[in-house]
Amino acid sequence: MGLGLLVLSACVRLPDAPTLPTNDTRFQQVAVAEPTGLDQDAPQPLTVLPGDVIAVAVISSETTTYEGLLVDETGRVHLPLSGTVEVGGMPLADAERRIETAVRELDRVARVALRITEPGGHLATVLGAVGTPGRVPVTPGMRLADLIATAGGPGEEVEPPDGGAALRIADLSSARLIRNGQALPVSVARAVEGDPRHNVRVRPGDHLHVPFARGNLVAVLGNVEAPTVLVHRAGMRLTEALARAGGLDDAADRTDVHIVRGPLEQPLVYRASVRAIVNGNATDVVLAAGDVVYVTEEWTSHVGEVLTRIASLLTTPATVALAAGILAQ
């Protein structure tokens, strides 16, 4: 990986960090459109789906009940004597009438009662950074926030092995709910907050993917009390990130904190004075997703030495996880 741009001569002075990432036109961060939510989210009737197990009661001069009838992958169920009947995807009442029509070929006065005993087809899939990924039963009225809660909630907070603030490994802002092969225009983060336009009803067959927060991190390294990684959020500032890393240690240079931004092949490197920010002589710096904040000790000899140290730390993006496997769990 080319990190040659980090190794500069001693005479180079790093530029001051811009207050906002967008103040430097060299930095291009891809903007992600905010999902609009759904205007219409009408409830649907209970349907018979492939994978369901049903019970059929045939009522005539006497009542006969057939238990444990599996709706196969094609949506069909086999009834003794009456043969195979297609019921998959039908509302319960329609499926009941379809079976009754088949039964009446043998008994014209028969009536049929249908119930789902095991809703094996009423499942949604939840994968990624949740407590218990897998297939989740979809119950009538279940909403997106309920689905996440049933799957154990967003990824557990992981304590970095060398201390520091806990890292919640789920990136809800990038999570997507897929239905019929298409991502719905809903924000999972806003659904968890209860926004009705985003906390939509879950349908059987829905697929929810909650990614790990690998690409949405800020790393705080060097002379801080507890080097750590944090999940980035809009508006996160330098002083907040340093505070969540336990603050600067006694040897830290408070006048020359470094911020590495952008792709490591061609990074932008800035400096900021925490002392000036605290004293009101400089504005705090808003961080971008993927930033690395690096604090050196006082009296570091020159800029080239500082950047060489940073380069040695940033061999791969995985170093942002403090090389401790935090995000690999």
Image: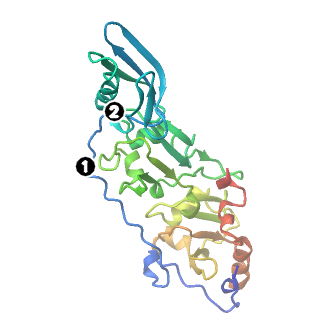
**Residue pictured at 69% horizontal, 80% vertical:** 307
On the rendered structure, is 183 left or right of 218? left
Q: Are marks 2 and 1 in contact (CB under 8 Å)?
A: no
Residue shown at 71% from the left, 51% from the top: 161
Determine the secondary structure under disc 2. Answer: loop
Residue type at the position of mark 1: Gln
Q: Position of residue 198 (x, y in %)?
A: 34, 50
In-front residue for pair 280/245 = 245
Instruction: Please indicate, yes or no, whether residue 118 appears anywhere in the rendered image.
Output: no
Question: Any mark on residue 46, and which?
Answer: 2
Count residues near mark 1 (Cα–Cα under 10 Å), then give few for <14, some for 14-19, many for 20+: few
Q: Residues within 10 Å of mark 2 (few under 14, many from 20)?
A: some
Q: Quadrant of residue 322?
A: bottom right
Q: Quadrant of the N terminus?
A: bottom right
- Whether residue 82 is visible, yes or no, is yes
Please identify the quarter of the rendering in which residue 146 is found: top left
Q: Which mark is residue 40?
A: 1
Residue 8 numbered mark, or none: none
Label 2 vs 1, first from the N-terminus: 1
In this view, the mark in front (2 or 1): 2
Instruction: Please indicate whether residue 196 sits to the left or right of residue 56 in the image.
Output: left
Q: Residue at x 42, y 71 (%)?
A: 31
Placement of 27 over or under 320, stated as above or below? below
